[in-house]
Image (cartoon, rainbow, N blue to C red):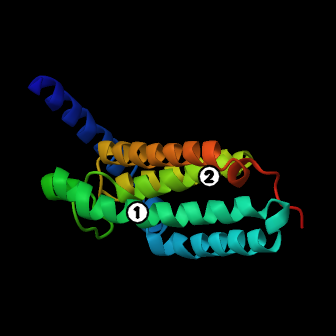
Amino acid sequence: MQELIDLLQSLDTRALYAINHGMSNRIFDAIMPQITTTAFWMPIYVIGIVGLLTQGARTWHHGGVRLVTCAVVMMAGILVLDPVGHHLLKEVVGRPRPYLVLPDIHKLIGSGGGSFPSNHAMNNAFIAFILSAWFPRWRTLLWGVALLIMFTRLYCGVHYPSDILGGAVIGASVAFATVHVIGNRWPRCLNAQPPQS
């Protein structure tokens, strides 16, 4: 069993080096630290949520309830997931960040707390799954953005690939369960026709 664990850890480290070292270049060094920050995406998140709430309120009786539900689900999910990741899962697992264990990692940004799971991966997988359920036509773009953010965490040297995978699985699983419950109990909030302006 220990041999399997050692093999997986070795593959995890090699994959990290392949991205953090193997793909290193000046352009990525300049843009990845910007893309990976919550501050970069926060205005987009805020505008999107305000837009959903506003349009949903305006068209409440013509399908707008689904937009309000989407916004509320996203906000509630992140308000629960983010602190659970930071103050429970990271503390219980206690995995150190890769730059603390591997001295030659290119660390491009600051970070705090444990390494597993990646909150960025968890939160963005949750958001991508939720938005894809409400707006399936945008699924490719939504998951493309989520995967880009996950990639930046590896490139910037603050997570192992398994941290990203674990966070994404947790976030997507919670989103799947949430969509399942809403679809069964309140289908109008998920499957109603898009609102008419």
- Label 1 Cα crowd, 10 Å radius (few <14 / some 14-19 / many 20+): few
Numbered label attached to residue 116: none
Q: Is residue 186 above or below residue 4?
A: below
Q: Nearer the viewer, residue 92 or 157?
A: 92
Q: Residue at x 29, y 47 (%)?
A: 160
Query: What is the CA distance from the residue labelled 2 to the residue labelled 1?
Result: 21 Å
Report which residue position mark 1 lands on. 80
Quadrant of the rendered structure where residue 181 is?
top right
Q: Nearer the viewer, mark 2 or mark 1?
A: 1
Report which residue position mark 2 lands on. 142
Q: Percent from the top left, x then y, of residue 196? A: 89, 62
Q: Is residue 86 above or below residue 186?
A: below
Residue type at mark 1: give it: Val
Query: Is residue 170 toward the left or the right of residue 195 in the image?
Result: left
Q: Is residue 158 above or below residue 43?
A: above
Q: Residue at x 77, y 64 (%)?
A: 64
Dot placed on the residue nearer the N-terminal end, 2 or 1: 1
Query: Is residue 44 toward the left or the right of residue 58 in the image?
Result: left
Instruction: Inspect this view and state whether residue 37 appears.
Output: yes
Q: Percent from the top left, x then y, of residue 90? A: 23, 57
Q: How many marks?
A: 2
Residue type at mark 2: give it: Leu
Q: Percent from the top left, x then y, of residue 152? A: 42, 56
Quadrant of the rendered structure where residue 158 is?
bottom left
Q: Percent from the top left, x then y, of residue 116? A: 26, 51
Q: Residue at x 41, y 53 (%)?
A: 122
Q: Secondary structure at mark 2?
A: helix
Q: Is residue 180 above or below residue 153?
A: above
